[in-house]
Image (cartoon, grey):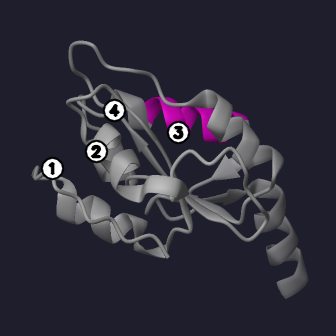
């Protein structure tokens, strides 16, 4: 699992460290002053790997509203989706829907467009088809 020895201390570090505990890989990109950039550096070889498998749980960190911000890494997200990773982990709905978190909002729109749902608003995104299959198997 992903354990981030983050040296950059912000009010978000503990929230994000907890969020990424269940993750096997991380997609994170941001400007040099951003937490997303610091997380990618801390995750080392587990960040932005370009290679994903079905069993991966992929954390996503996207830069918020600031001067010089960088959009999320769409290429990495596409690769993870093509590999049908088990789950993506983002901020919860409450956290990502603040005016600052425009990067998380971009990721939300992208995941929804690609058939993923955050069923309980906790930031755990699974493929809609898997959700439907699981529900049909319970009936």
Q: Residue at x 68, y 44 (%)?
A: 50
Tell me if I can see residue 139 in this picture. no
Instruction: Please state if 26 lies on the left or on the right of 83 as rendered.
Output: left
Q: Quadrant of the C terminus?
A: bottom right
Instruction: Please state if 124 lies on the left or on the right of 122 as rendered.
Output: right
Q: Give the residues in magenta.
A: 105-113
Q: Residue at x 63, y 41 (%)?
A: 111
Mark 2 vs 3, N-terminal side: 2
Mark 3 vs 1, N-terminal side: 1
Q: What residue is shown with label 1?
A: 8
Are dots 1 and 2 in contact, CB under 8 Å? Answer: yes
Q: What is the secondary structure assignment of the residue under circle 3?
A: helix
Q: What residue is shown with label 4?
A: 63
Magenta stretch: dominant secondary structure: helix
Are dots 2 and 3 in contact, CB under 8 Å? Answer: no
Q: What residue is shown with label 3?
A: 108
**27 is higher (above) or lower (below) than 85:** above
Q: Nearer the viewer, residue 65 or 40?
A: 40
**7 is higher (above) or lower (below) than 131:** above
At which x and y percent is residue 116? 68, 49
Q: Nearer the viewer, residue 93 or 27?
A: 27
Alpha carbon distance from label 2 to label 3: 21 Å
Mark 4 vs 2, N-terminal side: 2
Q: What residue is shown with label 2?
A: 38
Alpha carbon distance from label 3 to label 1: 25 Å
Mark 1 vs 2, N-terminal side: 1
Q: Residue at x 81, y 52 (%)?
A: 83
Q: What is the secondary structure assignment of the residue under circle 4?
A: loop
Number of other residues with Cα within 10 Å of mark 3, as a class: few under 14, some 14 to 19, many 20 or more:
many
Q: Examine the structure image and report whether residue 108 is included in the region drawn in magenta.
A: yes
Q: What is the secondary structure assignment of the residue under circle 2?
A: helix
């Amino acid at each position: 699992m992903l354990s981030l020895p983050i040296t950059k201390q912000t009010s978000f570090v503990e929230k994000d460290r907890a969020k990424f505990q269940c993750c096997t890989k991380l997609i994170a990109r941001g400007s040099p002053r951003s937490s997303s950039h610091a997380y990618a550096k801390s995750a080392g070889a587990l960040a932005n790997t370009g290679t994903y498998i079905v069993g991966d749980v992929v954390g996503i960190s996207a830069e918020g509203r600031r001067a010089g911000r960088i959009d999320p890494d769409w290429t990495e997200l596409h690769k993870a989706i093509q590999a049908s990773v088990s789950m993506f982990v983002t901020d919860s709905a409450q956290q990502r829907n603040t005016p600052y978190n425009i990067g998380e909002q971009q990721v939300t729109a992208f995941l929804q467009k690609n058939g993923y749902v955050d069923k309980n608003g906790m930031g755990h995104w699974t493929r809609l088809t898997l959700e439907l299959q699981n529900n049909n198997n319970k009936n």
